[in-house]
Image (cartoon, rainbow, N blue to C red):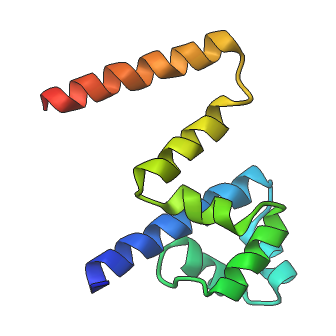
Amino acid sequence: MNKTEQDRLAGSIGRAIAKQRVRSQMTQEEVAERLGVGNEAVSRIERGRVIPNIVRLIELAEVFNCEAAELLGQASFHIDDQSSRMKQLLAPLNQNDRQLVMDLVENLTTRLQQG
């Protein structure tokens, strides 16, 4: 993996962790306290400056009460992982809202393909 790919992965994982932290209604300070690290460590992870190791990723998942695979899946650029993420996002919606999202995605992809 080259430097550009590592930077992209770090940024993607950082964004996934930040989203999960916000969903969990926690501050960076609260996460840092639960992990026993400084606030700056959490900030560096969320900004994609540092990629958390496996142990830290599992600890973060425990803090957010989710699976480590969920954090990684949110950060993945693989279509199967992205499809699974879409399924998770759609699941709690009612049928009409799911259809609205699907229509938006379909219209957006059509427009992007026309470039």
How far across and down, in percent of the image, does residue 73 sit? 57, 59
- Position of the N terminus, as image quadrant, is bottom left
The relative height of residue 106 versus residue 36 in the rendered view (above or below) is above
How far across and down, in percent of the image, does residue 33 sit? 84, 81
Q: Which residue is more in the foreground, 115 or 38?
A: 115
* Direction from residue 110 to residue 65 in the image, left or right: right
For the question of whether residue 92 can be seen, the reply is yes
* Direction from residue 55 to residue 75 in the image, left or right: left
The relative height of residue 100 versus residue 81 in the rendered view (above or below) is above
The relative height of residue 57 versus residue 12 in the rendered view (above or below) is below
Q: Which residue is situated farthest in the left direction here? A: 115
Residue in the image at 83% along x and 70% along y: 63
Residue in the image at 74% along x and 74% along y: 60
Image quadrant of residue 22?
bottom right
Q: How many marks?
A: 0
Residue in the image at 66% along x and 64% along y: 69
How far across and down, in percent of the image, does residue 105 sit? 41, 26
Q: Which residue is situated farthest in the top direction here? A: 96
Q: Which residue is situated farthest in the front direction here? A: 80
How far across and down, in percent of the image, does residue 92 sit? 74, 29
Residue in the image at 61% along x and 36% along y: 87
Q: Which residue is more in the foreground, 6 or 87?
A: 87
Q: Which residue is more in the foreground, 62 or 48?
A: 62
Image quadrant of residue 2?
bottom left
For the question of whether residue 39 can be seen, the reply is no
- Position of the C terminus, as image quadrant, is top left
